Image (cartoon, helix red, strand yellow):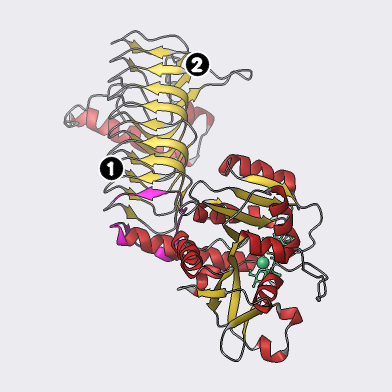
Amino acid sequence: MRNVIILAAGEGKRMKSALPKVLHPLLGRSLVGHVLAATESFLDNGTVTVVVGHGADQVRAHLAQVAPAAVPVTQAEQRGTGHAVRIALDANPDITGTVVVLNGDIPLLRADTLAALVHTHETTKAAATVLTAEVADPTGLGRIVRNRGGEFSAIVEERDATPAQRAIREINSGAYVFEAAALRDMLGKLSTDNDQGEEYLTDVIGLLAEAGSPIVAHRAPDATETLGANDRAELAGLRAIMRDRINDEWMRAGVAIIDPATTWIDVTATLSRDAVVEPNTHLRGTTSIGEGAVVGPDTSLIDVVVGAGATVVRTHALSSEIGPQASVGPFAYLRPGSKLGVKAKVGTFVETKAATLGDGAKVPHLSYVGDAEIGEGTNIGAATVFVNYDGVKKQRSVIGAHARTGADNMFVAPVHVGDGAYTAAGSVIVKDVPPGALGVSRAHQRNIEGWVERKRPGSAAAVAAAEANAVFQEREEHHVDPGPVVERPAPDEQ
Ligand code: UD1
Ligand code: CA
């Protein structure tokens, strides 16, 4: 059994944010969420204690959501990382054996790296094992100090370091494994005799070394894993590293990512092989992309299921399901609760919300479909609005299967259009249309002959009309065949 303590009480002043630093988002999880996720593989039923302080209520609420098994412990005053661990251990007097301590602000740590750190610790029977890394720029970090024999002897914070120590490029990552009794013992001996007047967890290492206890430095295979973020610019740097890491993994798994630099996939999203992700695409939350589906360019999907072979182009979609071989966009907006069946289509400049489209149903152009059910094989005419809101409450409308509704219809909810029914273009449908009926609701058209010539004499319109009438007259006089008679399209066709 391993026990984990995560330090998350700091404010992160340089983020200049109302949000505590460890809650800042990074491709699908908060900073502390990433750290928590990395511990899952080796926990082995152990406890997870999270030290909270700055923004404690916010951090507690977040933990309750993402890691309900983690136990928050409050550090009212931030008196240093050693003080924080002491509070966590005091809250868990029964803990023995392996204790993993992790700074809450090192989100790029891989689960495998942490597992290897724990393994090193347990097989070497060290009192403490520290994850270190060799970095190009160690500014601001604790340095790994070794004695003449090259043995790890202390961690010295930059602000307390001598110039020679500052030149060291091996740094403390902020991930440690301790033997519980040794840790407890040394935490009781920490002083605040340093530049910040804090109890440094890192001083435990020096104390253990002095006492002759075995301490081990375990090098991270990839130094970027140990990077932290102190401000938003650094956080953006971490985000880019994580983006590349995630994209590489999906490409190796058979996903085509056309422009990895502009493709942002949350760690929580999943893709199937032969999926194609076009440039400037964001796949967030629990989004999943089926085999061979094409998403993007310029698309954001948040908690969206995309079926195999579907196409989603220039689309913004939230909490929706897009069926296999369905087609969405360009310029579509799927709001929560949109469900598209197999081969369904939501086309250009279409917004949907709490709407179900049956298999093969189509809403091709310029429409709003809110609180509606559209049956399979039905075609909704261009520029249709489902009038779902009477100013007080939202109501649903239902269009049956294989219906053909005319362009520029208003379906005033609640209204029901039966299977196989038609509606005429320009209709405001307020009453149910029975199956197979044609619903028509619009004023009859009348043409007032010669109106333009009388009311707008001399205008371009009047001149054009006069010319057209002259040509018509000519034909009448010479009996010119006007060509085949073109029938007016039925009201449903567009
Ligand atoms: C710490 C290490 C440093 C290491 C670096 C790696 C110490 C003294 N120094 O420095 O050697 O190179 O991490 O990133 O530990 N926290 C609390 N309570 C406190 C103080 C801090 O919970 O009283 C939490 C913070 O929220 C943060 C973590 O501990 O998640 C580390 O604290 P931070 O102030 O960021 O330490 P660094 O200066 O980065
Ligand atoms: Ca830090």
Residue 294 in percent (x, y) is at: 32, 50
Q: From the viewer's perspective, is residue 464 above or below residue 129?
A: above
Q: Verify whether residue 264 appears in magenta.
A: yes
Q: Which residues are magenta?
A: 252-272
Q: Which residue is mark 2?
A: 413
- Earlier along the polypeptide chain: callout 1 or callout 2? 1
Task: Indicate yes or no whether the magenta region holds residue 395.
Answer: no
Image location (x, y in percent) of residue 163: 71, 90
Tell me the quadrant of ligand 2.
bottom right
**Which residue is drawn at the image coordinates 50% and 17% (left, top)?**
412
Residue 473 in the image: x percent, y percent? 29, 30
Element type at marker 1?
A: loop
Tell how many labels: 2
C-alpha separation, residue under disc 1 versus residue under disc 2: 33 Å
Q: Against 382, is 120 above or below? A: below
As drawn, the label of residue 308 is 1
